[in-house]
Image: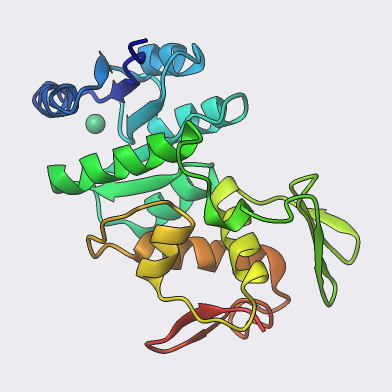
Amino acid sequence: MEQRKKRILIVEDERDIAEILKYNVEKQGYEAEVACDGEKGLALGLSGTFDLILLDVMLPKVDGFEICRRVRSRLETPIIMLTAREEENDKILGLDLGADDYMTKPFSLGELISRIKANIRRYSGETVVKAQQDDDDGKIVIDELEIDMSAYSVKKNGEEISLSKQQYELLVFLAKNRGKKFRQDALLEAVWGYDDYYGDVRTVDVTVARLRKQIEDNPSEPKFIKNKRGMGYYMD
Ligand code: CA
């Protein structure tokens, strides 16, 4: 039986960029549809008929952040945000709203394609996220932090903490591998499912920073998610 082609939604108001993206993902064997404004992008994004969304931030009518937030409130579809500026705040906001990754324009098409592939594989269950391979029903308790993997919930002092999917998966991975240190590229591979390493590891740093903000009493002196210069992130 022939497998259904995976479908990618491209929400991008700059037609040249949209066309280049469409051409390149189609060349990889995906089906692509372009939405040129935020309103159309939101409607298509919520249709649930796509396997991945490439989402520009600055869009007419409805911006990318709003689309991300609303799609994520209903669907798990992987979202890669395309930000035009090197603004740390844009990345943080995007990842906070549940985007799986972001890329800053101008980006390498090879890198984008690689990330698209990894996210689609992960979403469609073709690769099991290593963080979830074993004892998924178990609980991990580290001091006042409790991770309940059957309920996908994290509590601190008994109070539920709201984490994005990536923050959660990163936490579970480190918690399951306590004592081991992981560099950002290793985490990109293990948690995000990227098999090629392209050098933009800030996704990991930003996600760790946000995770710390959620779980640490003092994010600048972290007790749970520690790091050692040049050695990577770890939990004791
Ligand atoms: Ca734009």
The spot of residue 27 in percent (x, y) is: 12, 25
Quarter-of-image position of residue 144: bottom right
Q: What quarter of the picture does the N terminus occupy?
A: top left
Q: Residue furthest bottom?
A: 229
Q: Which quadrant of the render holds ligand 1? A: top left
User: On screen, 187 above or below 69?
Assistant: below
Work out whether residue 135 or residue 116 is closer to the camera in this orientation and state it.
Answer: 135
Whether residue 227 is visible, yes or no, is: yes
The spot of residue 228 in percent (x, y) is: 48, 89
Instruction: Give the colour scheme shown.
Output: rainbow
Q: Residue at x 49, y 29 (%)?
A: 77
Whether residue 60 is visible, yes or no, is: no
Please give left or right for residue 2 compared with residue 125 in the image: left
The spot of residue 14 in percent (x, y) is: 16, 25
Q: Residue at x 53, y 50 (%)?
A: 129
The spot of residue 40 in percent (x, y) is: 37, 11
Work out whether residue 73 or residue 140 is closer to the camera in this orientation and state it.
Answer: 140
Quarter-of-image position of residue 218: bottom right
Please give left or right for residue 41 compared with residue 199 in the image: right
Q: Residue at x 31, y 27 (%)?
A: 59
Please give left or right for residue 141 compared with residue 50 in the image: right
Please give left or right for residue 179 compared with residue 206 in the image: right
User: On screen, 194 above or below 223?
Assistant: above
The count of marks equals: 0
Q: What quarter of the picture does the C terminus occupy?
A: bottom right
User: On screen, 14 above or below 195?
Assistant: above
User: On screen, 71 above or below 215?
Assistant: above
Work out whether residue 82 or residue 200 is closer to the camera in this orientation and state it.
Answer: 200
Q: Residue furthest right?
A: 158
Q: Residue at x 24, y 65 (%)?
A: 199
